[in-house]
Amino acid sequence: MAASIASVATGLLTACGSSTTPATSSPATTAGPQTLDATYVTLPTKSASPTGVALDTQGTLWTTEEGGDAIAHVSSNGQVTETKLPRPGAPGLGIVRAPDGSTWFTDRDANEVDRLATDGALLRVRLAPGSTPLGICAGPLNSLWVTENGGDVVDRITAGGTVTKAADLGGGTSPVGIVEGPDRNLWVAESNGIARVTPSGVVTQYALSPGVGVLRIVDGTGSDLWFVEEQGGRVGRIDTSGHITLLSTTFNQPTGIALDNSGTVWIAEQGAGTIDRVTSQGDVVRYAVDSPSAEPEDLIAAPDGTMWFSEFGSGEVGRFMTARPSV
């Protein structure tokens, strides 16, 4: 992960909810790395540094280019189109497709959230100076929900671009990823823990170890959500009651996490240059990506059984069949 994002994802959590010590799963076997049997697409801008990823209903991948000041979309057959942004400054790691087909993404350096309409029109929704928006998701109340890493709050944004502060998470929480959970609440990745935020703004926080830097959190199966600790090097799950379980395996800077169509968990392990699969027994199988500079960043599963991922270091995106990940 880029140092500029990693550095803003650490702070001191003031816990106001459960703070029980997370359980750790039984020791697991770690295998690999094997060679990932993936197809790679190089983005037009050499310094693209793709970060966040999203998919539309046509199977097109959308990704933010931190180094290219652009949004790229890659069709299912590998054709790439870039939309350059009208100002310098890197988009953040959050990108999501809204129900109306528009693409929303966070713009960290400009302190704004932008909407790219289907006709290419760009709506720039400005936030307060120093807000540093990073995560975004579509969620309750037909709204977009955004984390302000610098402001320690969650914002709600309507489809028309009206912003309201939905919840104050407390100083130093440095929120990053956000997702709507199976309970219809918002779940937020914080510097030292995880927060649950109701649509009405009630916050409950669940503490992990100081400085672990929870980066992304995704909906799982049943009542579970999964998350990665970028600085802590751990992967875990939390259920909607707040019970946390960590995998016993440690990871080298895990930055992305996704579940495939069968419910299998996949991890982008940026520091190791691998994509990892967690088996139903809790074992970890690692697959090496195409080059040492690749730095896999984020993952998203497609309905056709493929998994897309972004490579921050190489300016590429890749795709592989989850049923046949190795050569």
Image (cartoon, rainbow, N blue to C red):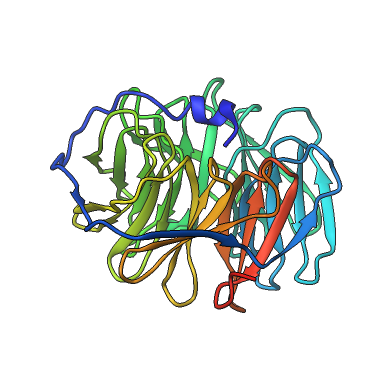
Q: Picture quarter containing residue 224?
A: bottom left
At a point 41% along the width and 29% down the height, the residue shown is 174
**Quadrant in the picture for the C terminus:** bottom right
Residue closer to the observer: 180 or 192: 192
Regarding residue 86, the answer to whether it shows in the image is: yes
At a point 46% along the width and 30% down the height, the residue shown is 149
Q: Picture quarter containing residue 11?
A: top left
Could you tell me residue 317's position as x and y percent? 71, 55
Could you tell me residue 161's position as x and y percent? 59, 44
Check the image and report above or below for 206 versus 322.
Answer: above
Could you tell me residue 225's position as x and y percent? 34, 58
At a point 66% along the width and 27% down the height, the residue shown is 110
Could you tell me residue 277's position as x and y percent? 46, 63
Q: Is residue 4 left or right of residue 242?
A: right
Q: Picture quarter containing residue 39?
A: bottom right
At a point 21% along the width and 51% down the height, the residue shown is 24
**Quadrant in the picture for the N terminus:** top right
| Count of numbered circles on the image | 0
Residue closer to the observer: 323 or 68: 323
Check the image and report above or below for 177 versus 225.
Answer: above
Residue closer to the observer: 13 or 209: 209
Residue closer to the observer: 213 or 275: 275
Q: Is residue 135 left or right of residue 19?
A: right
Q: Is residue 320 left or right of residue 207?
A: right
Regarding residue 144, the answer to whether it shows in the image is: no
